[in-house]
Image (cartoon, helix red, strand yellow):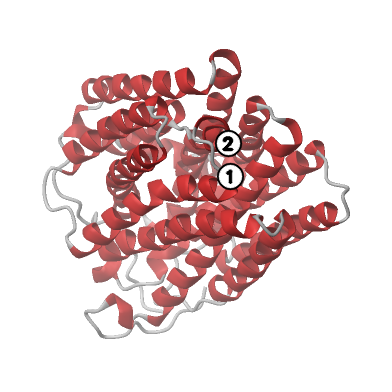
């Protein structure tokens, strides 16, 4: 990638490349969250099946597993901006296909699953590529700040996207899908034509050793492996978002607007936490704060599962978002601050696969257990499982619990001139 000289300013907002990156990420997350609301409600309206809600998550997750080793190598081998542009075109086209089928009354459950899988495959390439692109949008001194501030873009989209998606769904799912297409096109323009502030490392050669390097690197870092796997198992067991259509319609007696608010509630807490951490970064005891956040996540999940009062359910989900963001910032900071530039794509691919497993595979787990036991027991048992995982991981990964400060690793930045 070509590069320009970075702006000489202490303010991250003066770094125009990062501002464009932030806006592009906001558009993409906004679109994806609106899509999740529309697909979830439409699938449940078509089938009334909790298991089918879980299968939506599985359809998104399986491509990331199948492509994990390939996408990381591609992100390190080719121009990340071109990869991002291609992925977002594919996502926009797949959503447009769902919209057209819905408009003509031809949409089916199998069609939605197939197109969601296409979107999942595109996101399998897009997510680690965008993560690997982030460090090249800011100067080195602003990287820790950028990690936290980038999270606010994602959480802003997660706050507003589901709420707007739920409101627009009143006019029909086609309207939601059309807005999603427009947002993905906007993200493509913003992210696909960035000018990096510094040069990327030389392209890696293709061989079996380089393809597996991301996995080997994470395994060699106990704190990094512990952070990523902790998030995987905690959210895998404690994730309840796939069941929100059931809670909204059958337990809390609301419509699509209520589902939108429920999906937005965790992001309200997460956004507030991300903004707080962007202004007041974690200075000490980062590992302990991560474990405290995971434990609080489990408690909030249990409270949500037991609640049948809409305001209390919203409050529990807000608490869930607050605790989750504490864990996210620590984990993402450890990944970005300790990964060499030339391996960012491969490490980000492994990290993205773990995140996908915790979210999409967690949705499948929730749908499956809800089909066995019912929605409320599935959520409560999942929350208890999260608490068990937090305690177990403190014993298995003592170096993670001992992490104190989040600092830039001396090997993670390649400061070669453009």
Residue 169 placement: quadrant: bottom right
> Is 96 or 6 nearer to us in this picture?
96
* Residue 271 coordinates in the image, percent (x, y): 34, 56
Q: Secondary structure at mark 2?
A: helix
Residue 135 placement: quadrant: bottom left
Q: Are marks 2 and 1 in contact (CB under 8 Å)?
A: yes
Disc 1 crowd rating (10 Å Cα; few below 14, some 14-19, many 20+) is some
Quadrant assignment for the C terminus: bottom left
Identified at 49% across, 64% down, the residue is 25
Identified at 42% across, 61% down, the residue is 156
Identified at 45% across, 79% down, the residue is 3
* Residue 273 coordinates in the image, percent (x, y): 27, 53
Read off the residue under disc 2: 249
Identified at 60% across, 75% down, the residue is 189
> As drawn, is 112 to the left or to the right of 324?
right
* Residue 313 coordinates in the image, percent (x, y): 39, 37
> As drawn, is 85 to the left or to the right of 148?
right
> Is 251 or 10 nearer to us in this picture?
251
Which one is earlier in the sequence, the residue at label 2 or at label 1?
A: 2
Residue 255 numbered mark, or none: 1
> Is 251 or 130 nearer to us in this picture?
251
> As drawn, is 300 to the left or to the right of 380?
left
Disc 2 crowd rating (10 Å Cα; few below 14, some 14-19, many 20+) is some
> As drawn, is 233 to the left or to the right of 286?
right
Rounded to the nearest angstrom, the CA distance separating label 2 from label 1 is: 6 Å
Q: Secondary structure at mark 1?
A: loop
Specify whether residue 64 is in view.
yes
């Amino acid at each position: 990638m070509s590069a320009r000289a970075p702006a000489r300013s202490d303010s991250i907002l003066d770094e125009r490349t990062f501002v464009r990156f932030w806006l592009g990420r906001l558009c993409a997350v906004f679109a994806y969250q609106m899509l999740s609301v529309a697909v979830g409600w439409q699938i449940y309206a078509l089938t009334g099946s909790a298991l089918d809600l879980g299968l939506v998550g599985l359809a998104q997750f399986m491509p990331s597993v199948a492509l994990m080793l390939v996408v990381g190598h591609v992100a390190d081998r080719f121009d990340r901006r071109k990869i991002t542009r291609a992925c977002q075109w594919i996502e926009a086209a797949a959503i447009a296909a769902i919209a057209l089928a819905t408009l003509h009354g031809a949409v089916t459950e199998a069609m939605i699953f197939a197109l969601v899988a296409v979107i999942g495959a595109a996101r399998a390439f897009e997510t680690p590529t965008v993560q690997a692109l982030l460090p090249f949008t800011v100067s080195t001194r602003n990287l820790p700040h950028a990690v936290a501030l980038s999270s606010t873009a994602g959480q802003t989209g997660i706050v507003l996207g589901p709420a707007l998606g739920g409101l627009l769904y009143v006019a029909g799912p086609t309207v939601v899908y059309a807005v999603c297409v427009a947002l993905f096109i906007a993200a493509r323009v913003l992210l696909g034509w960035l000018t990096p502030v510094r040069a990327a490392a030389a392209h890696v050669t293709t061989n079996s050793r380089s393809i597996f390097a991301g996995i080997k690197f994470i395994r060699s870092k106990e704190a990094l492996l512990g952070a990523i796997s902790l998030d995987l198992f905690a959210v895998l067991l404690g994730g309840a978002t796939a069941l929100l259509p059931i809670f909204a319609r059958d337990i809390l007696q609301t419509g699509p607007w209520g589902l939108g608010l429920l999906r937005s509630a965790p992001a309200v807490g997460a956004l507030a936490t991300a903004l707080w951490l962007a202004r007041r970064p974690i200075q000490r005891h980062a590992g302990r704060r991560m474990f405290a956040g995971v434990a609080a996540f489990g408690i909030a999940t249990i409270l949500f599962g037991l609640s049948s009062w809409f305001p209390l359910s919203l409050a529990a989900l807000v608490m869930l978002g607050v605790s989750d963001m504490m864990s996210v910032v620590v984990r993402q900071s450890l990944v970005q601050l300790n990964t060499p530039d030339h391996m960012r794509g491969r490490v980000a691919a492994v990290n993205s696969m773990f995140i996908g497993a915790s979210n999409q595979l967690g949705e499948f787990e929730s749908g499956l257990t809800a089909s066995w036991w019912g929605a409320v027991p599935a959520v409560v048992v999942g929350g208890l499982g999260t608490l068990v995982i937090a305690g177990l991981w403190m014993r298995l990964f003592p170096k993670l619990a001992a992490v104190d400060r989040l600092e830039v690793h001396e090997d993670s930045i390649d400061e070669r001139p453009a």
